[in-house]
Image (cartoon, rainbow, N blue to C red):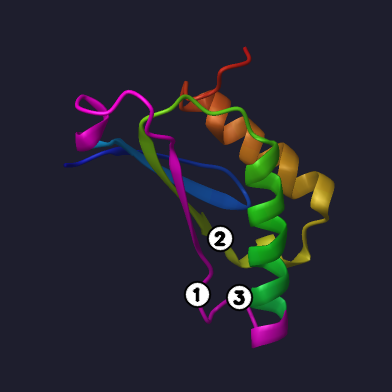
């Protein structure tokens, strides 16, 4: 199933509707995080992934989607507030947010 993608300075968001959502109304949205080796050493990549995971916990997302955040090079230099703001903005841009 093909989905759509949205991007900003720090991340690319790719999302598609889950096939099993029609059969199971209780299924939650799933998140994936991609941080390539272009970002930096392992410490920088893990720090970026930790910030992305914590920020995703704060998002109110519609159920039934697979959502992948792909970090861009300058994401490793972003503060936690910038990461939260960027991910929230992308979710709103994709119309996946429960809160308008």
User: Looking at the rendering, in which quadrant would you find the C terminus?
Assistant: top right
Q: Are marks 2 and 1 in contact (CB under 8 Å)?
A: yes
Q: Is residue 41 visible?
A: no
Residue beneath disc 2: 71
Disc 2 to disc 1, how far (Cα)?
8 Å
Q: Could you tell me which residue is drawn at 73 percent across and 42 percent down? A: 84
Whether residue 97 is in magenta: the answer is no
Which mark is drawn over residue 39? 3
Nearer to us in this view, 83 or 31: 31
Q: What are the residue bounds of the magenta stretch?
A: 19-43
Q: Main secondary structure of the magenta part?
A: loop
In the rendered image, residue 44, in percent from the top left (x then y), is placed at 71, 78
In the picture, measured across the screen, residue 100 lies left or right of residue 43, that is left
Q: Are marks 3 and 1 in contact (CB under 8 Å)?
A: yes
Q: Is residue 29 visible?
A: yes
Which mark is drawn over residue 27? none
Q: Are marks 2 and 3 in contact (CB under 8 Å)?
A: yes
Taking the view exactly as shown, the residue that stands out farthest to the bottom is 41
Q: Could you tell me which residue is drawn at 43 percent across and 35 percent down? A: 28
In the picture, measured across the screen, residue 91 lies left or right of residue 4, that is right
Secondary structure at badge 3 equals loop
């Amino acid at each position: 199933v093909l989905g759509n993608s949205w991007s900003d300075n720090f991340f690319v968001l790719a999302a598609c509707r889950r096939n099993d959502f029609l059969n199971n109304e209780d299924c939650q949205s799933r998140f994936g995080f991609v941080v390539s080796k272009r970002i930096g050493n392992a410490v920088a990549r893990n720090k970026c992934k930790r910030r992305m995971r914590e920020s995703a916990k704060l998002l109110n997302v519609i159920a039934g989607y697979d959502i992948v955040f792909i970090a861009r090079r300058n994401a490793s230099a972003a503060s936690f507030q910038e990461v939260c703001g960027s991910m929230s903005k992308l979710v709103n841009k994709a119309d996946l947010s429960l809160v308008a």
